[in-house]
């Protein structure tokens, strides 16, 4: 198994079958070796620095009906909310004070946030905080929309492909969501020179190791600047309520594989990882992640952005808990920095 890990580190592409074998590793020695190589590569490239992003969840209205997601349109129990421009700017103000230099505006696909509305907010943030990066995570939009938002100043965009396999994609989403459109969006974002993020849920219903192997090959080809993965966690008001969560072990293994596959990528230790295990975030960093995204949304709305059961939104997950988060990173030898935290690969292009 070590030869596969070495091969991956040397940037020799593995076949789908080899990825499947790597994903199935179970010997402690092999897992330790994988984790150690990923951590070394991460430290070589990004040092002991951990970047933070202030996550602002701007709306939980969504026109989509993804079977896994707690803010799907059919969930009548979701209490819907949307932030005003003023509220978003005040989140940024708060975040700037705390040391955040990236703001992530994430939301469901809410028709209220038309291009003009988003562009106006993005340009206001960039005007007030020229030293900050703005990341958008607002789902599938037209090429034109992505272009306008980039022109307004957006730097990065997050859009997980969720799964590369179209048959699997159709088991997670209703027919009106077309996996080809999702891939079109990602190609557009790359072409428009957004720092582009993609990713998957680990252990989503019906997912096989072959699916994940194909996700890895797709990611290698797309060459995204950011890769977000977290365990699937059921939400009680969705069709997938009775499925098991993805595991922390598989998520950590995949973070390490991704670090070796895309050494320069920005890879977060996600909220979902922190939610399934109290030490999830730290373990994620030690497995090769280099980003954490604390919540900057207004306190009264945080509980409403419930993508899955028991989603963390306080303690170290909250922007106000930053000191505690800093301390827990220090304990494992890492340091949270006040920096935009751009992808190192940008310097090459
Ligand atoms: N469990 C884990 N992750 C989820 N997401 C949505 N619902 C869930 C869930 N039940 C993830 C999706 C989406 C991101 C914003 O949140 O991968 O892209």
Image (tube, helix red, strand yellow):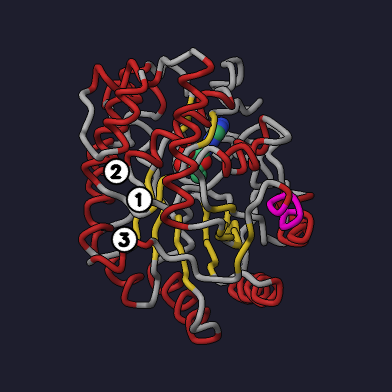
Query: Magenta stretch mostly in which secondary structure?
Result: helix
- Mark 3, Cα crowd under 10 Å, few <14 / some 14-19 / many 20+, is some
x and y percentages locating residue 80 in the rendered image: 64, 49
Q: Residue at x 45, y 61 (%)?
A: 136
Report which quarter residue 320 is drawn in.
bottom right
Magenta residues, start to end: 325-330
Instruction: Indicate which disc residue 140 carries.
Output: 1
Residue 326 lies in the magenta stretch: yes
Q: Earlier in the sequence, mark 3 or mark 1?
A: 1
- Mark 3 CB in 8 Å range of ligand 1? no
Reading the image, the residue beneath label 3 is 345
Reading the image, the residue beneath label 2 is 182
Q: Is residue 242 above or below residue 14?
A: above
Side of 189 relative to 201 (left or right): left
Q: Secondary structure at mark 3?
A: helix
Q: Quadrant of the C terminus?
A: bottom left
CB under 8 Å between callouts 3 and 2?
Answer: no
Residue 74 visible in the snapshot: no
Q: Is residue 268 above or below residue 23?
A: below
43 or 157: nearer the eye? 43
Q: Earlier in the sequence, mark 3 or mark 2?
A: 2
Residue 271 visible in the snapshot: yes
Question: Which of the two discs, 3 and 2, sits closer to the camera?
Answer: 3
CB under 8 Å between callouts 1 and 2?
Answer: yes
Using the numbered discs, state the Cα–Cα distance from disc 1 to disc 2 in whole angstroms. 7 Å
Question: Which of the two discs, 3 and 1, sits closer to the camera?
Answer: 3
Residue 292 lies in the magenta stretch: no
135 or 57: nearer the eye? 135
Q: Secondary structure at mark 2?
A: helix
Q: Earlier in the sequence, mark 1 or mark 2?
A: 1
């Amino acid at each position: 198994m070590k030869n596969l890990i070495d091969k991956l580190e040397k940037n020799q592409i593995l076949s789908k079958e080899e990825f499947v074998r790597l994903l199935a590793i179970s010997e402690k020695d092999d897992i330790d070796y994988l984790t150690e190589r990923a951590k070394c590569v991460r430290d070589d490239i990004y040092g002991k620095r951990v970047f933070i992003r202030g996550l602002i969840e701007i709306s939980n209205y969504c026109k989509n009906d993804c079977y896994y997601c707690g803010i799907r349109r059919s969930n009548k129990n979701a209490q819907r909310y949307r932030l005003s421009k003023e509220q978003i700017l005040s989140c940024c103000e708060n975040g700037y004070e705390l040391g955040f230099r990236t703001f992530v505006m994430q939301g469901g696909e809410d028709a209220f946030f038309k291009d003009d509305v988003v562009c106006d907010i993005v340009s206001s943030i960039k005007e007030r905080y020229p030293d900050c990066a703005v990341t958008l995570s607002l789902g599938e939009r037209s090429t034109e929309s992505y272009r306008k938002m980039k022109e307004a100043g957006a730097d990065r965009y997050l859009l997980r492909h969720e799964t590369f396999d179209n048959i699997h994609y159709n088991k997670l989403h209703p027919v009106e969501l077309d996996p080809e459109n999702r891939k079109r969006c990602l190609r557009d974002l790359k072409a428009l020179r957004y720092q582009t993020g993609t990713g998957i849920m680990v252990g989503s219903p019906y997912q096989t190791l072959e699916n994940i192997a194909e996700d890895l090959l797709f990611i290698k080809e797309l060459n995204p600047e950011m890769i977000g993965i977290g365990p699937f966690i059921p939400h009680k008001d969705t069709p997938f309520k009775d499925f098991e969560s993805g595991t922390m072990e598989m998520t950590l293994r995949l973070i390490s594989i991704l670090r070796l596959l895309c050494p320069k990528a920005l890879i977060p230790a996600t909220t979902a990882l922190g939610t399934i295990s109290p030490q999830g975030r730290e373990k994620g960093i030690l497995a090769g992640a280099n980003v954490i995204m604390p919540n900057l949304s207004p306190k009264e709305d945080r509980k409403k952005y419930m993508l899955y059961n028991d989603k963390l939104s306080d303690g170290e997950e909250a922007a106000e808990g930053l000191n505690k988060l800093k301390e827990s990173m220090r304990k494992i030898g890492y340091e949270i920095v006040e920096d935009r935290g751009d992808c190192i690969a940008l310097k090459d292009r």
